[in-house]
Amino acid sequence: EPQLVESGGTLVQPGRSLRLSCTGSEFLFDDYGMHWVRQAPGKGLEWVAGLSWSSRTIGYGDSVKGRFIVSRDNSKRSLYLQMNSLRREDSGLYFCVRGYLGGDHDRGAFDMWGRGTTVIVSS
Amino acid sequence: SYILTQPPSVSAAPGQTATITCGGTNIGDKVVHWYQQKAGQAPLLVVYDDSDRPSGIPERFSGSNYGDTATLTVSRVEAGDEADYYCHVWDGTGDRRGVFGGGTRLTVL
């Protein structure tokens, strides 16, 4: 069965860095746009970042632009999120999400979600 | 940046119809997707491209989009439909951002 599995979430101090990873299986990972969506405790969904299948197009949410970097390695079927200058408000559950088949990153729905990895930013 | 507005809560009795709205300026010119999130679970796509359903999603879930409002309709509501529902669009500006509505809690009475 196709799935996405996230890893890398942990407790980290404000101002530090953290790298999240996501591995896809049982589908053609390198054909799809991929994204990170987060959810603070008790709050709604927030799109964090995404990139097209080829990494040709990339986008970031306002709250993370300039601090986070999204990337992928199709040979490893993996998506990454480099999180720098972390703030308390970055705490939450980070979902790896499959996007559009082919094309640019900002098209289509999110049709597959991982279970998420938890990031806690606290001193 | 583009803003999507959803009512915080909606309720319906079993067998009735629940209507969840998603408001945005000229949202009818955009493509809207809807997700269901049950407690403790990852979101699930229930409607995409305004009104299409993924495989496995019951016909009771339907969507429409016109003018300044997109709507998710859940017909013949069941207890298992109790969840948070989120609308989602791409804002279409130069920054190419994804946007979610604030979410609506559907309570089955």
Image (cartoon, coloured by chain):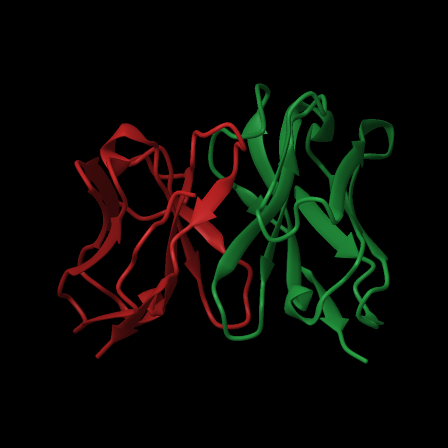
Measured as percent of width and height from the top left, residue A3 is found at 67, 46
Between B49 and B62, the residue placed more toward the observer is: B49
Residue B55 seen: no
Say which of A78 and B101 sits in front.
B101
At horizontal 78% and vertical 36% (from top left) the residue drawn is A71
Place of residue B6 in the rendered image (x, y in percent of width and height, measured from the top left): 29, 58
| Quarter the N terminus of chain A occupies | top right
Is A97 placed above or below A102 here? below
**Relative to A102, residue B71 above or below:** below
Taking the image as shown, residue A102 lies to the left or right of residue A56, namely left
Residue A69 visible in the displayed image: yes
Image point 43% across, 29% down: which residue?
B92
Q: Position of residue B58 (x, y in %)?
A: 31, 48
Which residue reaches farthest left? B16
Res B40 → quadrant: bottom right
Chain that appears green: A
Compared across the picture, whether B105 is left or right of A37 comes to left
Q: Is residue B7 left or right of residue A21?
A: left
B44 shown above or below A91: above
- Which image quadrant: the C terminus of chain A? bottom right
Where residue B78 sits, quadrant-wise, is bottom left
Give the chain coloured red.
Answer: B
